[in-house]
Amino acid sequence: MPEAIVTATTPRDYEAFGEVVREYVEFVRSRYADEGDFVDSVFTHQSLDDELKILATAYGPPAGQTLLAVRDGRVFDAARQAGFSLMRLDTGDRLAEAIAMCESLGFHQCDPHHAYPPELVRFLVFMEKSLTDV
C-alpha cells in the first residue's frame, strides 16, 4: 500500500484530521470506560467540540502545521523543511503503547507545554523531539 505525507491545507484535510481525533477520543472512552468521568473531564477541558471546529486555525500556519500519515520519519523531514525546530505532544499516562511509540521515534518527556488544570496534568505525559538533532 503506498504511503504519503500530506500537509493539511484544505477543509477536507482538516476534516480527515478531525475524524482521526474523534476516533481517538472514542478509543480512549472505550479503553477507559470504567473511568468515564476522568476521560470526560479531560476532553471537556479541551473544549474538544469547539476545537474540532477550528482545527485549521489551532493546528495550521503560521504557528503550526498538520501532517497526515507518517512513515519512516518523513514527517520529521517535512516539519524541518517547513522551518520547525521542535515537535511537541501530550498523551494520557495510561496509554503505554502511544508513549512507547513516541519514545521509539525519538520523543522524550518534558515539562508541560499546554495549560491544563492541575488535577489533570498529573495524568498526562508531555513529550517533545528536537528537529535540529541529526
Image (cartoon, rainbow, N blue to C red):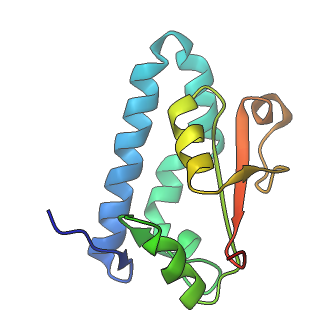
- Front in this rendered view, residue 133 or 60: 133
Looking at the image, residue 92 sits to the left or right of residue 120; the answer is left
For the image, the number of numbered tags is 0
Above/below status of 93 relative to 132: above
Q: Residue at x 55, y 80 (%)?
A: 79
Q: Quadrant of the N terminus?
A: bottom left
- Front in this rendered view, residue 74 or 63: 74
Q: Residue at x 37, y 57 (%)?
A: 18
Query: Where is residue 72 drawn, in percent x and y?
Result: 41, 65
Q: Quadrant of the C terminus?
A: bottom right
Q: Name the residue at the front extreme.
A: 134
Above/below status of 32 relative to 125: above
Query: Where is residue 132 drawn, in percent x and y?
Result: 72, 79
Query: Where is residue 29 drawn, in percent x and y?
Result: 44, 26
Looking at the image, residue 57 sits to the left or right of residue 111; the answer is left
Query: Where is residue 57 drawn, in percent x and y?
Result: 54, 75
- Front in this rendered view, residue 108 or 29: 108
Q: Quadrant of residue 44?
A: top right
User: Does residue 60 appear anywhere in the picture?
Assistant: no
Q: Quadrant of residue 26?
A: top left
User: Does residue 91 appear anywhere in the picture?
Assistant: yes
Q: Name the residue at the top extreme.
A: 34
Q: Name the residue at the left extreme.
A: 1
Above/below status of 99 relative to 88: above
